[in-house]
């Protein structure tokens, strides 16, 4: 599945339109982040039913988006499931296992999570 490029304009719509969204926030000028981006793309080819997306924080509009999300270190991977952030972490390029993270995110009891979120509103 091709990687979707998210911008400030399509970010919220993409989260709402997809049950599971995995986002790689990265600056295009960082060679280590570019390396992870290739791994990210390879994983996206293996897993169906998930929107894989990237936000290039190296340009002004998307850097504003990362600021609004309080992101300051990269690469950052964020997973939304049913519009809830279930994973958000600056990753260690050596030991990060995206497939394992996705397995854990898919195994979450989202009904229970929504109940807990509703209690805290």
Image (spheres, helix red, strand yellow):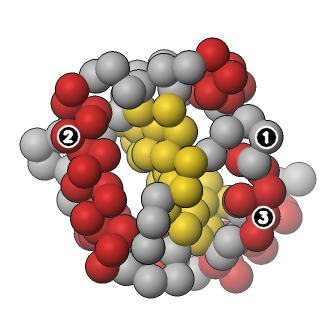
Rounded to the nearest angstrom, the CA distance separating label 1 from label 2 is 26 Å
Rounded to the nearest angstrom, the CA distance separating label 2 from label 3 is 29 Å
Q: Nearer the viewer, residue 110 or 83?
A: 83
- Residue 83 occupies quadrant: bottom right
Above or below, 4 relative to 74: below
Above or below, 54 relative to 69: below
Rounded to the nearest angstrom, the CA distance separating label 1 from label 3 is 13 Å
At 57% from the left edge and 81% from the top edge, which residue is drawn? 109
Mark 2 or 3, which is nearer the eye? 2
Q: Secondary structure at mark 1?
A: loop
* Residue farthest front in this picture: 2
Quick one: label 1 or label 2, which is nearer the N terminus?
Answer: 1
Residue 24 in percent (x, y) is at: 44, 45
Mark 1 or 3, which is nearer the eye? 1
Give the numbered dot on residue 16.
Answer: 3
Q: Secondary structure at mark 3?
A: helix
Does residue 117 appear to the left or right of 53 in the view shown? right
Residue 86 in percent (x, y) is at: 55, 59
* Residue farthest left in this picture: 94
At 78% from the left edge and 64% from the top edge, which residue is drawn? 16
Residue 78 in percent (x, y) is at: 50, 49
- Residue tagged by mark 2? 35
Quick one: label 1 or label 3, which is nearer the N terminus?
Answer: 1
At 66% from the left edge and 75% from the top edge, which residue is drawn? 19
- Residue tagged by mark 1? 9
Above or below, 86 relative to 88: below
Q: Nearer the viewer, residue 114 or 56?
A: 56
């Amino acid at each position: 599945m091709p990687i979707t490029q998210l911008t400030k304009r399509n970010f919220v719509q993409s989260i709402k339109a997809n049950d599971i969204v995995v986002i790689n926030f990265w600056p295009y000028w960082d060679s280590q982040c570019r390396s992870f981006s290739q791994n990210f793309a390879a994983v996206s080819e293996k897993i169906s039913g998930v929107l894989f997306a990237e936000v290039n924080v190296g340009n002004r509009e998307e850097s504003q988006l990362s600021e609004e999300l309080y992101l300051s270190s990269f690469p950052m991977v964020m997973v939304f499931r049913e519009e809830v952030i279930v994973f958000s972490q600056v990753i260690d390029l050596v030991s990060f296992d995206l497939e394992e993270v996705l397995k854990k995110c898919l195994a979450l009891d989202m009904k229970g999570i929504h109940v807990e979120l509703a209690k805290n509103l």
